[in-house]
Amino acid sequence: MKMEQVREIANAVLYEGYLLYPYRHSAIKNQQRWSFGVVYPREYSQANGGIEPWTMQTECLLVGSADTLLDIHVRFLHLLQRTTIQPQPAIAPSQAQFAEADLNENSMGHRSMNESWQEGIEREVSVPRLSLTDLVAHSRLVEITFPGERIVGNPSEASSATIIREQQPLVGTIIISAESLDDDLFKLRIRIENRTPETSAVTNQHNAVALHSFVSTHTILQAYQGAFVSLMDPPEALRDVAGGCQNLHTWPVLVGNEGEYDTMLSSPIILYDYPQIAPESPGALFDGTEIDEILTLRILTLSDEEKEEIRQGDVRAREILERTESLSSEQFMKLHGVIRGLRSIDEGGQA
């Protein structure tokens, strides 16, 4: 399977739960993100008893040799806070004393009642062409470093609102190592750690700490002149050693066409080997309900005001709306259901 197809499957994991119907940031269920695969800052995790993890670890088995090379891709969402500030309307001097209490000293003289929500930026750290032999001899440490950023601008010339996008810096490490178990059998380990320095101000604020976290974290592993072993259905001779793999907050499965063993996706959502995107799906809906037809029809019933809010919000929500409104009747029919295969039932009633 081509890497583009693998990334398509990985993106379904990356954005699982990113937005929920009705795709408006004013909806209560979209005001607080719920996401899989969150790797929190170490300081925050330890202050809360380790309930919310600051590490993620993948372990899997690989049949290889001195010629085996590996590509490792660690991917996650880096959240940013988007705030839309509306200009303060002119007020009479007699009303100034009442308006003063409504002003936020950090909002450049605008009302504190501003719209604010979180968006996600895709991040990826890739480590290509790693030698399996070298990893057995010495583990490889890779730094994760993404700077903070603050961008102030206007969404369009027609709008007088100001949009502020603010992103906190992220710091972490990826530790990649391998252990020889037999002549041609190896255990591969990828450990992800969030070491972002965190102030005590956000230690007990779950929404705030998300901005310092790796969200929807997952890993893609590719082998050249090597073959991964399924941990869901390992060969009988390898069942015990496969059971000894310690996967923390993630689970690796084979991806690609069935029968291929060169690529794995380590996902915070438990999948079967060889997961596929349904060809009938016109695009991602993020809601994680696997009911494309119902969600699509519900989107079309939204009011003009609700649709306008979607257009002014997250770019991915806007893409969902525009795609839904442009679907042809043939595409709608494909969403209604499909039979992928039939099998006979014997006389005893057993399939």
Image (cartoon, helix red, strand yellow):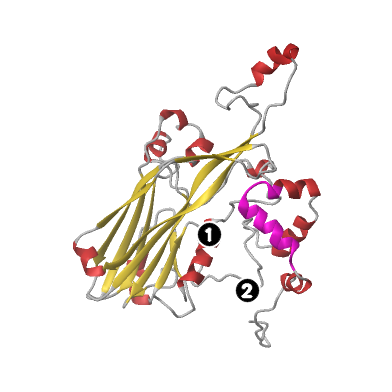
Say which element carries label 2: loop
Q: Earlier in the sequence, mark 2 or mark 1?
A: 1
User: Where does residue 245 sit, x and y in percent of width and height?
Assistant: 35, 62
Amino acid type of the residue tagged 1 in the rendering = Val
- The magenta segment: 310-327
Q: Residue at x 51, y 58 (%)?
A: 269
Secondary structure of the residue carrying tag 1 is: helix
In this orientation, does residue 182 appear?
Answer: yes
Residue 239 or 83: which is nearer the viewer?
A: 83
The residue to which callout 1 is attached is: 13
Report the residue marked by disc 2.
Answer: 279
> Considering only vertical position in the picture, is 97 above or below 235?
above
Q: Position of residue 339 (x, y in %)?
A: 69, 78
Membership of 311 in magenta stretch: yes
Residue 11 location (% of width, % of height): 53, 61
Figure label count: 2
How far across and how far down the image is residue 232, in percent? 45, 69
